[in-house]
């Protein structure tokens, strides 16, 4: 199986075969501007010392400061982070916000650490990276297994090191620590605005049945938002199991169950089944909201959804894209579908720089305008090029980056 960065380059090649780009630009965009690898020593609660490997990939800043999350995950490595940084550069260009693309990570399983150990790791990451990030250089954010509290620790550490206490160095902070209203729900909310803008073009009914892979932040908020709009959540999964009910799941009760048991499994009134099989559940819309490379060449033929909307980063491999396209199953790509998160992160950065605080209503009005406008532009470009939405999105993003680099 290809690593995530090889998949990203394959997506690039597929898109750039449709439109003529400058050869020097294409050569350059296949390489990140900078890759940083650091060692982060942490004194554990038992007095022992663990040394963790941390990363920051700064992919492209032609359109603004590098922007992208930091993930704490045992499988994080430089190739994965490089792919995520590349996708982030495209994502910020897709929604036309004044940011570039970057990504960070630490190879660690935070579920095996105490809160105090996680704080030491978070502050250590910031100390190691403080020279290369900043409000006008690189603005990180949360990602897998990182939280608003972790962002607050990192912002505080940056302030101690540099004296810059604006908070604009990092986004996704708690609201009372300079975070933006609506940031927690922004990824799912932005995805819903995209869904509403494209639903008829995707051939979906007014009331859809929804299956969601991944029931963390994005998956839970997606379930709440789609259910509140009258759609039926028929199956969800997390890392420990999956449940389904063709008549629909009670999302609020399910979130309470997950909070108390740490899994969706065993939810009363639903059938338990294998977590991977949620991808094959018959439904109108499948929402992958977990990790990369979930829909692949070896399982894409089992997908029974009428359409796929990617709230996760990179959940569909290029080979699977072609198989789904051949079966007339449209895929709303991650660089559009989950761009609500980075868009509201950019709003947070702007608020911090200006010393302002916007209402949630104001944030979502701005977010909806951007997501609807760019969704329709991408659908139009894809139709013009007689291609899928991913390649349409790539072409628009690459044209904007190329123009900035000129």
Image: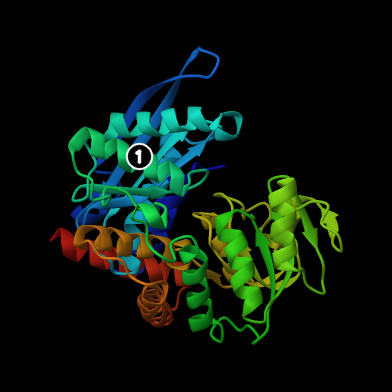
Considering the image in quadrants, where does the C terminus appear?
bottom left
Up the image or down, 163 lies above or below 244; here it is above
On the picture, is 104 further left or further right than 350?
Answer: right
* Residue 122 in view (yes/no): yes
Single out the residue that lies furthest toward the left.
406
| Mark 1 element type | helix
Residue 235 x, y percent position in the rendering: 74, 64
Considering the image in quadrants, where does the N terminus appear?
top right
Q: Specify the quadrant of the image occupied by residue 223.
A: bottom right
Q: Residue at x 57, y 70 (%)?
A: 325
Single out the residue that lies furthest toward the top.
48
Up the image or down, 172 lies above or below 330; here it is above
- Choose between 338 and 187: the one closer to the eye: 187
* Residue 21 in view (yes/no): no
Q: Residue at x 80, y 63 (%)?
A: 244
Q: Specify the quadrant of the image occupied by residue 395.
A: bottom left
Residue 4 x, y percent position in the rendering: 48, 45
Q: Which residue is identified by label 1?
A: 154
- Choose between 193 and 330: the one closer to the eye: 193
- Choose between 296 and 261: the one closer to the eye: 261
**Residue density around tag 1, few if under 14, some if 14–19, many if 20 or more, within 10 Å:** many
Residue 404 x, y percent position in the rendering: 17, 62
- Choose between 129 and 292: the one closer to the eye: 129
Q: Which residue is drawn at 43% across and 45% down?
A: 5
Residue 383 x, y percent position in the rendering: 43, 82
């Amino acid at each position: 199986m290809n690593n995530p960065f090889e998949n990203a380059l394959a997506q690039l090649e597929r898109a750039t075969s449709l439109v003529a780009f400058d050869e020097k630009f294409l050569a350059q965009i296949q390489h990140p501007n900078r890759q940083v690898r650091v060692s982060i020593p942490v004194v554990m609660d038992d007095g022992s010392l663990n040394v963790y490997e941390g990363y920051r990939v700064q992919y492209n800043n032609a359109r603004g400061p590098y922007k992208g999350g930091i993930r704490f995950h045992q499988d994080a490595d430089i190739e994965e982070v490089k792919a995520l940084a590349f996708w982030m550069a495209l994502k910020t260009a897709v929604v036309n916000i004044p940011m570039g693309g970057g990504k960070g990570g630490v190879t660690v399983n935070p579920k095996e650490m105490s809160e105090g150990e996680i704080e030491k790791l978070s502050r250590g990451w910031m100390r190691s990276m403080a020279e290369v990030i900043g409000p006008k250089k690189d603005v990180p954010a949360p990602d897998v297994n990182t939280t608003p509290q972790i962002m607050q620790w990192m912002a505080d550490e940056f302030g101690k090191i540099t004296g810059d206490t604006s908070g604009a160095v990092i986004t996704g902070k708690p609201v009372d620590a300079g975070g933006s209203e609506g940031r927690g729900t922004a990824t799912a909310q932005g995805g819903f605005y995209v869904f509403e803008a494209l639903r008829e073009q995707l051939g979906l009914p007014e009331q859809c049945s929804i299956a969601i892979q991944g029931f963390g932040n994005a998956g839970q908020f997606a379930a709440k938002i789609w259910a509140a709009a009258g759609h039926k959540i028929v199956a969800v999964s997390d890392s420990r199991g999956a449940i389904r009910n063709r008549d629909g799941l009670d999302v609020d009760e399910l979130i309470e169950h997950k909070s108390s048991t740490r899994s969706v499994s065993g939810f009363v009134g639903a059938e338990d089944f294998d977590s991977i099989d949620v991808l094959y559940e018959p439904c109108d819309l499948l929402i992958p909201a977990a990790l990369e490379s979930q829909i692949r060449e070896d399982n894409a033929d089992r997908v029974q959804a009428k359409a796929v909307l990617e709230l996760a980063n990179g959940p569909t491999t290029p080979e699977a894209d072609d198989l789904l396209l051949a079966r007339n199953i449209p895929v709303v790509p991650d660089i559009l579908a989950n761009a609500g998160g980075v868009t509201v992160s950019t709003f947070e950065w702007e608020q911090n720089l200006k010393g302002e605080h916007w209402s949630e209503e104001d944030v979502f009005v701005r977010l909806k305008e951007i997501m609807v406008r760019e969704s329709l532009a991408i659908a139009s470009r894809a139709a013009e090029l007689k291609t899928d939405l991913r390649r349409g999105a790539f072409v628009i993003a690459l044209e904007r980056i190329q123009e900035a680099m000129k």
